Image (cartoon, rainbow, N blue to C red):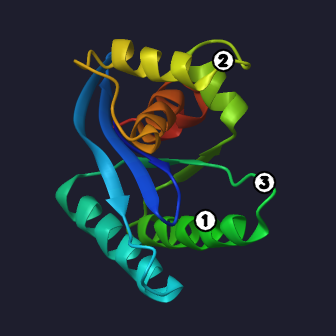
Amino acid sequence: MIILGIDPGIAIVGYGIIEYKNNSFKVLSYGAITTPAKINLSSRIKSIYDDINTLLAKYDIDALAVEELFFNKNVKTAIDVAHARGVIMVACSNKGIPIFEYTPLQVKQGVVGYGRAVKKQIQEMVKIILNLPEIPKPDDVADGLALAICHCHSSNHSDIFRA
């Protein structure tokens, strides 16, 4: 099973692509899709959509694990992130990729085993679980990988295992 984990954002979209087979993880790719603040929102959204489609063309993704949108104090930021999240989900949906959404609490429990884990604990567990030489940067990238790990540790994915 190949999972694309996404931490959605408008300035930075963190992603991680991992293969999960026989309770073992193999990192295929990870990184960040970035958009400059100086361009308009529609151009930023199109850039994210195009970059996600490039990843989808390169890897045979079985599922998308994406963070659920949570409302923070800045309404404009939340709306912009929702736009980015939407185009990511549309790109995957267009390819027939099942989409699974996880709350930050679920990610913490799925990666660390503790719902009140702090960001540093999650990052350190991502590094350990995936046998990485260092914690991926920026934080959004580690979060994308954490979402993919969370999905692999959840019971929601049993219907998409490859034969």
Rounded to the nearest angstrom, the CA distance separating label 3 from label 1 is 11 Å
The first of marks 3 and 2 along the sequence is 3
Left of 105 or right of it: where is 39?
left
The amino acid type of the residue labelled 1 equals Val
Dividing the picture into quadrants, the one containing residue 126 is top left
Kindly identify which residue carries mark 1.
Answer: 81
Identify the secondary structure beneath mark 3.
loop
Position of the C terminus, as image quadrant, is top left
Identify the secondary structure beneath mark 1.
helix
Kindly identify which residue carries mark 2.
Answer: 117
Left of 96 or right of it: where is 29?
left
Marks 3, 1: nearer the viewer: 3
Q: Are marks 1 and 2 in contact (CB under 8 Å)?
A: no
The amino acid type of the residue labelled 3 equals Asn
Q: Estimate the x, y position of residue 9 in percent, counting from the top left.
A: 53, 59
Q: Estimate the x, y position of residue 66 in percent, counting from the top left.
A: 55, 49
The residue sitting at 48% across, 87% down in the picture is 40
Position of the N terminus, as image quadrant, is top left
Identify the secondary structure beneath mark 2.
loop
The amino acid type of the residue labelled 2 equals Ala
